Image: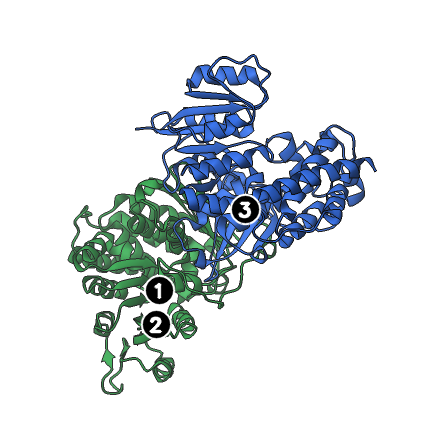
Chain colours: A green, B blue
Amino acid sequence: MSVGVAVLGSTGSIGRSTLQVLSRQRGRFRVVAITGHSNTDLLTQQAAEWKPAFVGLVNGVGKGDEGRGKGTACLVEAATHPDVKIVVNGIVGAAGLEATLAALRAGKRVALANKETLVMAGELVAQAAREGGGEIVPVDSEHSAVLQCVAGRQPAELARLILTASGGPFRTWGPERVSRATVAEALKHPTWTMGKKITVDSATLVNKALEVIEAHFLFDVPYTRVDVVIHPQSVIHGFVEFVDGSVLAQVGFPTMELPILYALTYPDRVPDLGVRRFDPVAAGALTFEPVQPDRFPAYVIGREAARLGGTAPARFNAANEIAVQLFLEERIPFGRIAEIIERVLGVGSREPGAGASLQDVLAADAEARRLAGEAACS
Amino acid sequence: MSVGVAVLGSTGSIGRSTLQVLSRQRGRFRVVAITGHSNTDLLTQQAAEWKPAFVGLVNGVGKGDEGRGKGTACLVEAATHPDVKIVVNGIVGAAGLEATLAALRAGKRVALANKETLVMAGELVAQAAREGGGEIVPVDSEHSAVLQCVAGRQPAELARLILTASGGPFRTWGPERVSRATVAEALKHPTWTMGKKITVDSATLVNKALEVIEAHFLFDVPYTRVDVVIHPQSVIHGFVEFVDGSVLAQVGFPTMELPILYALTYPDRVPDLGVRRFDPVAAGALTFEPVQPDRFPAYVIGREAARLGGTAPARFNAANEIAVQLFLEERIPFGRIAEIIERVLGVGSREPGAGASLQDVLAADAEARRLAGEAACS
């Protein structure tokens, strides 16, 4: 019997890669549900090819076929469909959180590419998984790398995680030049082809701060033991240091298809010839540099938000979403992204500590978005 | 209860490193037996420190204390001591084979640094392990790397192994200059401090040919799926490619203490602060090059011997042992090592295929040694 899969965000970058992977693994998996944001043409095309039982359109404008879900509620509907065993959550932004929680409570595996899920509500997610018997398997290449290195070992054997960061397009630029970088420059990622939001997050290294927070929750490792190193070639995706001093790493040419497939088959592996075979000689020299704090101020703020805990990571994430959106609309310069985030985190209301409810988190998210908008105009 | 360990070759490089590791893990392990080749001063000192139940001297000259084993028989005695659970086999050369077989038949774990065991008699070793319930855990850094990457996974998930080789001191030399290299030049290994024999084997890359054969037997992978890449920094010790295209690697600054500890605790890991912590930034640029066949003719012959199977690997190993000894005694130039091995493999008697007995193997070993001596004089 093939395993039923829901693909949330099927018309986005992760969703399209997921369907690409599934097209090579049709015997093992079948697509039960897909949801798209607003690309109705592609969604219709995917529905025709895969014939899923459920198709959802988040930004529906009332002209969809009968039997199709509409609005953000369709995400939960797809994620909890009874024939679905694995939910690939490729939604960008906070909208993905509710679907993750619902899927975990319904006992599903969530193959998670939605960073906001763990950043906003890491503790709530862990609780939902415990209650419903669901589990999270990361799709991010860095967290997939860590999972592949620790697979089958006890958490007590982990000493330290080292996530790699390409350093983005501004790695070698001076702070002055970076602060005036254009949208076109920020979108020129040296090694990965991804969506716009995440590409800008790679340029600010906010992406890596979010991944540090995710890693903390995914692998139950304190922040003091999650390090980041700049690795411009993006060939080594993560290191895991064990208590005996040994280090494992996951290695490969950049592709999201590999972590997606692993999240579907974990802890097993299945034959797949879809990704470019690794060749160390072709990889060239692999280099590593420390993160320079003055080049990546938003990353430093993100780590501080992580350390604060409570709703600070949610506010960090929300402020960044607004700031990046304003930057992509060319309404603020690149250098203001970090400034806006810092302003929002500095002026926010008191943090609830551990035990923040979903309401607390969503309120903090909303407040941070409002404050970020205000900060941008002042 | 602590686990009893026998250290065969306790006065050699692997043996001393093993006792170094054990000195940090006294609660978990105790030394039940040690054997040395001829360094009686160090053996006496080790016996005084560790107070093992059994002390053996291979090259004993009749003046040992009562209760001490003598001659090569002491290796089997130490390896099968009833209080021993793990035998660290750090013997150089063919003498280690019999002890491995005896330990496996007695149901012990053999932490194997003795290359000859698997090269000479890979099939016999597998049979002894099956019959007696023993197991082999590799101590070589390359095979330990592979084991750490595959630990817990099914053999069917392995697609390819890539062993790394430093390339030795002659990696960038022309063939002409290499053929006239001196003993002092051959012993200047760029990254590892090891015994003389194995250091010369690193310069010829015979070491890597032997490791390819070991990997074949240890991980049950056909030779066509065991590759070698030159990696001058010796920071990545091995890669494992899985059937889905993902690759794991084991990484660290060169030290034998880590693979030794892992062989003792496998599949678990225990806290140990004895090895230098890995730091990717301090590691510098990691580079990879293909093996140039014309620079390493003995490696090419070794792979051919592997492909032939039967007793060819044993003859390759024996011819190399004699040739290296002659080189270290400055009786032949470096370039003749490969020539002698090639001559021996070319003129030897017919190969028994699969199913060679220990007698076949030992006869092939003896014949190859005789032929190598003759080839050197002609």
- The quarter of the picture where the C terminus of chain A appears is bottom left
Q: Which residue is mark 3?
A: B122
Are the residues at dot 2 and dot 3 in contact (C-beta closer than 8 Å)? Answer: no
Label 1 crowd (10 A; few <14 / some 14-19 / many >=20): many
Closer to us: A224 or A27:
A27
Are the residues at dot 2 and dot 1 in contact (C-beta closer than 8 Å)? Answer: yes
Badge 2 and badge 3 in a common chain = no
Q: CA distance from mark 3 to mark 1?
A: 37 Å
Q: Where on the picture, by quarter, is residue A259?
A: bottom left
- Find residue B103 and report its horizontal and vertical position in percent: 45, 36
Seen in the image, is A271 located left or right of residue B27? right
Closer to us: A33 or A196:
A33
Q: Which residue is mark 2?
A: A29
Badge 2 and badge 1 in a common chain = yes
The label on residue A264 is 1
The mark nearer the N terminus, 2 or 1, is 2
In this rendering, the answer to whether A261 lies above or below A161 is: below
Numbered disc 1: secondary structure? helix
Q: Amino acid at mark 3?
A: Gly
Specify the subunit that label 1 lies on: A
Seen in the image, is B325 located left or right of residue B161? right
- Residue B348, visible in the rendered structure: yes
- Find residue A263 and report its horizontal and vertical position in percent: 36, 61
Numbered disc 3: secondary structure? helix
